Amino acid sequence: MSTDAFAAAIGKGAAMQKPRFLQALRIGLLFGVIEAITPLIGWFAGSVATKWVSEWDHWIAFTLLLVLGARMIREGMSEDDEDEEADAAPQKQSVVMLALTAVATSIDAMAVGVGLAFIDVNILEAALLIGLATTTMVTIGVMVGRVLGHLIGKRAEIIGGVVLIGVGAAILYEHLSRAGG
């Protein structure tokens, strides 16, 4: 489940200005907490939500990642003067954008939580392990993205946006191909 988040983290790490390990860890924790909460929500929702979640999760994730990716591409193509205005509240905006990305990449975990409701599993333990795996993968992804961002420079944000859109398209394709086949 954390592979989508890993790919998004590489894109975010590439777009950031040399993220440090503690920044990567904070991003990893944000993604991990959200990824751990979504199967709990799914587990609590049980069979009532399974039909809705499985029918729409891929469209929600695709739309969120498309919008976020397009925004990153637009910002990557903008001139430096325009960036100064956007930096007025960078921390708050960045956390919101990261949280939206985390939600978009973890929606499928809600469906997994629904499935876990029907088998004999300790949901708290499972959610903790899911969150821990995602935290680890995202932290590593941001640091990998840092190296890529250093190599590709200003184009990193554009590439990060393309990666997010690609992750969204992959999620959509995976779900639609399973439904059709």
Image (spheres, rainbow, N blue to C red):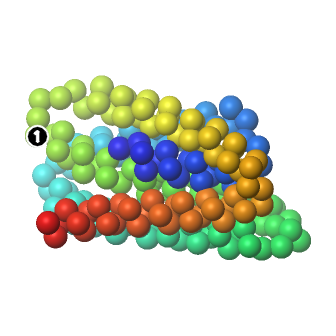
Q: Report the residue at 41% width, 42% height from top.
A: 2
Identify whether 43 is placed above or below 68. Answer: above
Q: 5 or 181, which is in the foreground?
A: 181
Indicate the quadrant where residue 79 lies.
bottom right
x 64%, y 46%: residue: 145
Say few, some or many: other residues with alpha carbon within 10 Å of mark 1 (under 14 / 14 to 19 / 20 or more): few
Q: Amino acid at mark 1?
A: Phe
**Corner quadrant of residue 93:** bottom right
Residue 88 in sight in this render? yes
Query: Can residue 41 be seen in the rendering of this structure?
Result: no
* Secondary structure type for disc 1: loop
Quarter-of-image position of residue 160: bottom right
Q: Residue at x 18, y 56 (%)?
A: 50
Toward the viewer: 121 or 20? 20
Residue 177, above or below 30: below
Question: Which residue, given by chain and number where applicable, does mark 1 sit on?
Answer: 118
Residue 155 in percent (x, y) is at: 72, 63
Q: Where in the figure is residue 140, as x and y percent of width and height?
A: 57, 35
User: Is 126 positioned to the left or the right of 91 in the image?
Assistant: left
Give x and y (percent) for residue 17: 77, 49
Front one among 136 and 30: 136
Badge count: 1
